[in-house]
Amino acid sequence: MKLLPITPFSGCCLGLGVLLLAGCAVGPDYQVPPAKLEASFKSAGFSAPAPEGSWWKLFGDSELDRYIRMAEQGGPSARAALARYDQARSDLGLAKADASPAITGEMYATRRQDSGNTNFSAGIYNDYRAALNLSWEIDLWGRVRRQIGAAAADTSAAGFEYQAVLLSLRAEVARAYLSLRFADAEIELLEETEGLRSEARRLMKARFDGGASSRVDHERSVVEHEAVKAELEQLRAQRAKYENAVAALVGRSASGFRIPARSGRPSSPGVPGAVPSDLLRRRPDIAAAERRLAAASERIGVAIASYLPRVSLNGSGGFGSLSTGDLFNSNSKLWSLGPEVDVPIFQGGRAFGDKAKAEAAYREALENYRDVLVKAVQETEDSLNDTRRLATASQARARGSKSSKKAAELVRKRYEGGATDYFEVVESERNSLNGQRETVSVQLNRALATTRLIQALGGGWTR
């Protein structure tokens, strides 16, 4: 239904109606759902404050810092998430554009002939036009405002999701790099052992050739030496995988990417702890889920407004003529201005279906938000428990490793003094090596658990 001509009286009525209805927006007004969480984590008990800012610097490794910066700048996942955020910002700009009048320019020059079987036929003639056209939807029911609100919430969610990707990416780089450095420590340990086993093999061969030792002792020395060599190669292969993982995370080709080996083990920082009300607000995935919920709420209003009348103000002004010489004189002026009302009458249930779909999407977003909250608490509880237990286990392993190493030294001295056989030497040195390797393994697991805990707490992100 179209109402093209307007009078001053009808124009005043229209303006008054617009002013009365401009503040009306159909659909529910969004409210953040309450998050009912426990007062504290059951596995807590640490006094150290939660990390802020560049949390990976707690490991005291400048190389780790460099690789994380490389991942932030060149990692494909981070760049893709940033591109999604830019798309959301563009969508918000498009939604805001719908709230403003649209003005287009029109200019054409045609030569035409109308049908002779119509009410108007002028033969062949020229037609010229130059005009500006105006179109503006009067947002009576808040459809455009709801669209802008939904787009704004989506943009915020995309920003938080970008932060979540960065948090996950930093944690993945840290875990891959720490695994590589602890592999270096274990390789160094095995290389030292391989040297000792090689020397023992040489000595056993000389003693056997000289008749001072049995063939059994000689063969055992060969078995122990070859076993260490095999384990060393397996560990080097695993280190190469960690190196390739870091390369992929920072966006580099694994073929030309190298991380030189070095001595020493990374240090594990103190375990942070605080109350959930302070920690969970730092998680970008929770903030993103809440913003997606807000966007879904706004779209319910958009769906409701779709089956209400839509009022637009259309206008046009310019010049039109059958010849170019007369196009811009006063008699060629043309203009039109008036409202246009579109009233949905029958759509086969489409409008109500859109509303039901929007409400179902809101319920889905609400459950997703609750799911993220529950999983956040679970991840934090798991990580707190792991870090606390592994800290105790690391200390116990270190004490046991020290004792097994001392025992191996004493057994070798007894063997050199002829008080025992070589089998006891091999067994004690194997126990010592296993103890040292298990110590390295527990220290690695503790460091990895610490990164998982920091990630579970939202890292250095603040809302």
Image (cartoon, rainbow, N blue to C red):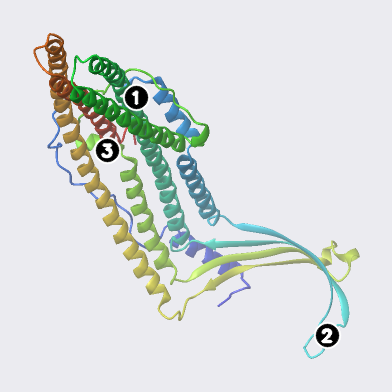
For residue 235, the mark is none
**Residue at point 42% right, 30% down?**
68
Mark 3 and mark 2: Cα distance apart in space: 77 Å
Q: Which amino acid type corresponds to the residue marked 3 in the rendered image?
A: Ala
Residues 434 and 16: in front is: 434
Q: Quadrant of residue 362?
A: bottom left
Mark nearest the camera among 3 and 1 is 1
Q: Return the disc, 3 or 1, that comes first in the chain's sequence.
A: 1
Residue 312 in view of the camera: yes
Left or right placement of residue 69 versus residue 98 in this view: left
Q: Which amino acid type corresponds to the residue marked 2 in the rendered image?
A: Ser
Which residue is the site of mark 1? 184
Q: Which residue in the rendered view is the most extreme toward the left?
A: 419
| x and y percentages locating residue 190 in the rendered image | 29, 23
Q: Which amino acid type corresponds to the residue marked 1 in the rendered image?
A: Asp
Q: Return the disc, 1 or 2, that comes first in the chain's sequence.
A: 2
Left or right placement of residue 236 versus residue 94 in this view: left
Residue 439 in view of the camera: no
Q: Return the disc, 3 or 2, that comes first in the chain's sequence.
A: 2
**Residue at point 79% right, 91% down?**
117
| x and y percentages locating residue 382 in the rendered image | 19, 39
Task: Identify whether 292 is placed above or below 453.
Answer: below
For residue 456, the mark is 3
Element marked by disc 3: helix
Local packing at callout 3 (Cα closer than 10 Å; few below 14, some 14-19, many 20+) is many
| x and y percentages locating residue 412 in the rendered image | 16, 13
Mark 3 and mark 1: Cα distance apart in space: 27 Å
